[in-house]
Image (cartoon, rainbow, N blue to C red):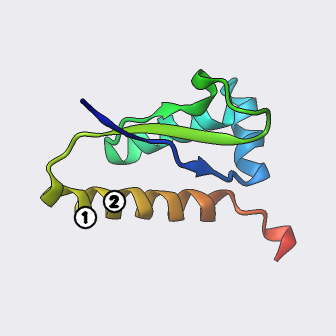
Amino acid sequence: GAMYSFPQIRLPQRAMDVAKSAGKAPDVYYCLKLLEATGISTVPGSGFGQKEGVFHLRTTILPAEEDMPAIMSSFKKFNDSFMEQYQDHSRL
């Protein structure tokens, strides 16, 4: 069997606006950027009937246990960078 994770992602409005202008759902945009930056493949939550305005992604946990720290570090680094890139600086 496989182990899945369905984390919720809270996307900045700027990221949602850029996704829309690119013709993508916000969670699809995030997943594509994650794949491009890290090689980590995820599935947008919109494919699973998530509630409007709430975003998730699904990842299948397949790597060997000893590889997980490096993978999670890469995921965190991407997420931090993505959120910083699209942060609404007018709210600071």
58 or 19: which is nearer to us? 58
Residue 16 is left or right of residue 72, and the answer is right
Q: Secondary structure at mark 1?
A: helix
x and y, in percent, of residue 87 in the image = 71, 63
Check if mark 1's residue and mark 2's residue have beta carbons within 8 Å: yes
In this view, 81 is above or below 63: below
* Residue at the extreme right of the image, as rendered: 90
Q: Secondary structure at mark 2?
A: helix
x and y, in percent, of residue 69 in the image = 25, 64
Residue plotted at (31% across, 41% down): 39
Q: Which residue is disc 2 drawn over?
A: 72
Q: Residues within 10 Å of mark 1 (few under 14, many from 20)?
A: few
* Residue at the extreme front of the image, as rendered: 1
Q: Residues within 10 Å of mark 2 (few under 14, many from 20)?
A: few
Residue plotted at (50% across, 58% down): 79
x and y, in percent, of residue 77 in the image = 42, 64
Q: Which residue is disc 1 drawn over?
A: 69
Cα gap from disc 1 to disc 2, whole angstroms: 5 Å
The disc at residue 21 is none
Residue type, mark 2 in image: Met
x and y, in percent, of residue 1 in the image = 24, 29
Residue 47 is left or right of residue 22, and the answer is left
Residue plotted at (75% across, 31% down): 21
Quadrant position of residue 41: top left
Residue type, mark 1 in image: Pro
68 or 80: which is nearer to us? 68
Residue plotted at (61% across, 60% down): 83
Residue 28 is left or right of residue 15, and the answer is left
